[in-house]
Image: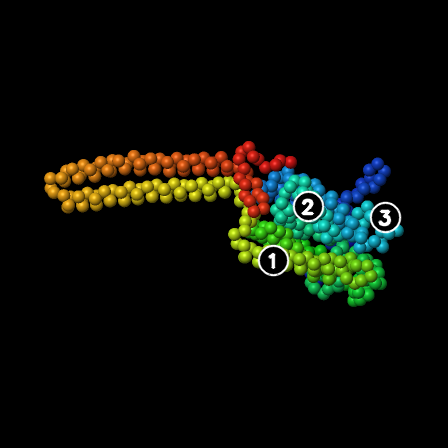
Amino acid sequence: MPDYLVDFPGLGIFDIPINRTIVEFDLFGRQFSIYWYGVIIALAFLVCIFLSMRHAPEFGMTRDQIVDYYLLIIPLALIGARLYYVAFEWDSFRGNLGRILDLRTGGLAFYGGVIGGVLAIVIMAAVKKHKLSRIFDFIAVYLPLGHAIGRWGNFFNQEAFGVNTDLPWGMYSNGTQEYLSSLSMSIRRMMPNLDPSKPVHPTFLYEFIANIIIFIILLQVRKRSKRPFTTVAGYFLMYGLVRFLVEGLRTDALYFTGTDIRVSQLLSALMIIASLIYLIISGMIKQRHPEREVTVAIPATILSEAELSETEIAVTEGSATDTETDDSKKEDAETEDSSQVDAETEDFRAEGSSQADAETEESKPEDTLTEKIGTEEGHAAEKTNSENANDTIFEEGVIHVSAPEDKPEQN
């Protein structure tokens, strides 16, 4: 017998069987259950780790460094998500503190997870002496993707839905009916028109779609932006807008004690304001100081190829200049010879020609030496570029190209 039967009446879809658990088994006399929610959260982390490791070398980081970050992010994010929820639902845990450790009944707040993840990044960046802007802007891209995947855990738990709706995609199940019927009178007073027997907004689906769009946009922002913290500010701005709107529909929102102020809605508003202020100020600073150095992620191979091309162009231009100089010298010599022929008598023509030939012969060694020096400098530049076409280590405002013996830190 499934835990829930889910309907989408407006779409003509009825009785979708949903179980909260994947499998249940006995081990050493105790019953264990593996829940879809936990599996989906784990899958979300794995996808983010895989993509982060795949793209890390493009941004001057090693795969081992990325693993180190996630080894701290995962536990602190889970702890933060739980403590955040417990803090604003303290009345439910006050009489039984042991329930704080029981995650099977739900109770993980996304914003608490973000706070824990940010703390983990700050700690690890301090240990590894990495620039915070580089790490935040890199990892922020994968946050909406992991969040989008994790929202399907809410579907299997039949939670994180909204108020009643007549829209075609409105959702109804025995789970939504049971939850709405169990709401306290204080909550029902804030949402007086709730009807447990009618479809509700599938707000988890709204956030899934919105987070996928944010993920795609942030990929382009990270690729094109040259200002620190722009990617993470873009995330806070876009998700803050989405969450502010969606939170106003949800029936399971967390409230500040004794008020009807939704915690996540207020936090979303602060995120929107802070990110807008930062983006505006950073844009003004860039315009006033266009010469300011910025962090640009350019692979070492591309950097060396560009320098090599510039060297070849310089050598070619140098050769062309030498050729023009030779032609100019020859023309000057011929002009001088003609003047001597017109000024002097016929008897000295042979002597004038001999002098012109002698001057031309004397200029040849100097021209040959100039060409040889220019060619040797070009070969030296090519050799230097070839030796330095290895890994590139990036810091804020600086591009370092390491020699073969100066490899990035391996952890």
Depth check: 299 or 217 in front? 299
Picture coordinates of residue 281, whole percent (x, y): 60, 58
**Residue shown at the point (47%, 36%) measured from the top left:** 384
Residue 192 against residue 175 in the figure, above or below: below
Query: In the image, what residue occupies the spot 45% across and 40% down?
Result: 308
Quadrant location of residue 312? top left
Residue situated furthest bottom in the rendering: 193
Nearer to us of marks 3 and 1 is 1
Q: Does any portion of residue 381 appear in the rendered image?
A: yes
Q: Secondary structure at mark 3?
A: helix
Q: Which residue is mark 2?
A: 122
Mark 3 crowd level (few <14, some 14–19, many ≥20, 10 Å Cα): few
Q: Which residue is mark 3?
A: 97
**What residue is at 83 percent from the left and 63 percent from the top?**
186
Q: Amino acid at mark 1?
A: Ile
Give the residue type at disc 3: Leu
Question: Which residue, as the protein is rendered here, is positioned at the far front?
Answer: 344
Name the mark on residue 208: none
* Marked residue nearer the N-terminal end (2 or 1): 2
Which amino acid, mark 2? Answer: Val
Residue that mark 1 sits on: 281
The residue tagged with tag 1: helix, strand or loop?
helix
Along the viewing direction, whichever of 145 and 262 lies nearer the viewer: 262
Q: Is residue 261 left or right of residue 288?
A: right
Give the image quarter of residue 237. Answer: bottom right
For marks 3 and 1, the one nearer the N-term is 3
